[in-house]
Image (spheres, grey):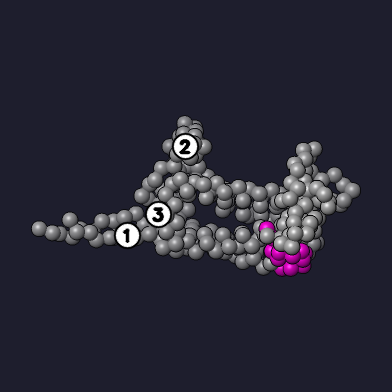
Amino acid sequence: MRKTDKIDIPAGHRLTTRLWHWFNALCLLVMIMSGLTIFNAHPRLYWGEYGANDDYAWAAVGSSQTVGYVRFGNTKIDTTGYIGNWRDADGKIQTWAFPGWATIPSSYSLADGRRWHLFFAWIMSFGLAFFMARSLWNRHIQNDLHMARGEWSPVKIWQDLKSHARLKMRRSDDVMSYNIIQKLSYIGVIFVLLPIMIMTGLAMSPAMDANWPILTDLFGGRQSARSVHFIGMALLILFFLIHMVMLLFSGPLKRTMSMITGGKSGVSVDE
């Protein structure tokens, strides 16, 4: 005798989450690459309100026809052939900070880099605001990212940290099941890091500085805002790399398909 039962498989990501995930990934890629083009115009970072070639830079990319390097404080890292000194497709040595394959556009153009960067920055800002509002409305934040009292246990957090460090990812069938480290990371990126990136971007704008100087003062000056902006970019790249490693070790196919299709629920099977 055969009968059909309906088995509920945990639902996947909501449509809003999936759309924002891929849309935001595209925006961030374009903004990072166009941001490197803008950085190429003056590859030095300062603290305070002002900064020029004769001022001390806490971070800089050095370039010449013979050597390239990245400097942090007094620590210098040789990057000849990759950053600061590299060869283009024709084999010619170029001395922009970052090579053409890592920038938009691939040839140096500060004006075009700014156009790409600002266009996608506004798109990402409006998308982030919509995602935040929608996630609160459909209770994605409350249901999926809420941290229960037991999750705040130092022992629990330490266990999750050790599991992540050892790349021992659990392969849960519930793609919406996040551990405490994932929840803290997602909340930190969505509600802290991305808003800071938007605010520091606005603080670097001469028009915003003239009309809302308090925004620039909040970060200690335009050059400080620029430094925080680039540190935030580095953190976003680090988050992406860790995200991809964790995905690889926790069942990449199932979780990637869930972020594309949303998963299935209510599947009928015969037994």
Report the residue at 89% width, 48% height from top. 54
Instruction: Measure how far apart labels 1 and 3 are at the Cα level.
Output: 14 Å
How far across and down, in percent of the image, does residue 8 sit?
Answer: 29, 56
Q: Nearest the camera: 99 or 144?
A: 99
Q: Which residue is mark 1?
A: 265
Q: Identify the residue at horizontal 77%, vertical 38% (top origin).
A: 75
Find the distance from the CA under tag 1 to the CA under tag 2: 30 Å
Rate crowding at label 1 as few (under 14), some (14 to 19) or many (20 or more) other CA atoms within 10 Å.
few
Q: Left of 85 or right of it: where is 5?
A: left
Report helix, strand or loop for mark 1: loop
Secondary structure at numbered mark 2: helix
Indicate yes or no whether the magenta region holds residue 159. Answer: no
Residue 25 point in image, percent of width and height:
56, 59
Q: Position of residue 234 (x, y in %)?
A: 66, 49
Screen quadrant of the C terminus: bottom left
Residue 61 visible somewhere in the drawing: no
Q: Amino acid at mark 3?
A: Lys
* Drawn side of residue 200 relative to residue 49, left or right: left
Is 261 rendered above or below residue 77? below
Look at label 1 and name its amino acid.
Ser
Residue beneath the point at 87% across and 47% down: 55
Which sits in the foreground, 54 or 224?
54
According to the image, label 2 marks what residue?
A: 163
- The amino acid type, in three-letter code, at marker 2 is Ser
Magenta stretch bounds: 102-115
Query: Dot 3: what SS?
Result: helix
Image coordinates of residue 99 in percent, x first then y, are 72, 57
Label at residue 53: none
Q: Quadrant of the N terminus?
A: bottom left
Q: Nearer the viewer, mark 1 or mark 2?
A: 2
- The residue carrying mark 3 is 254
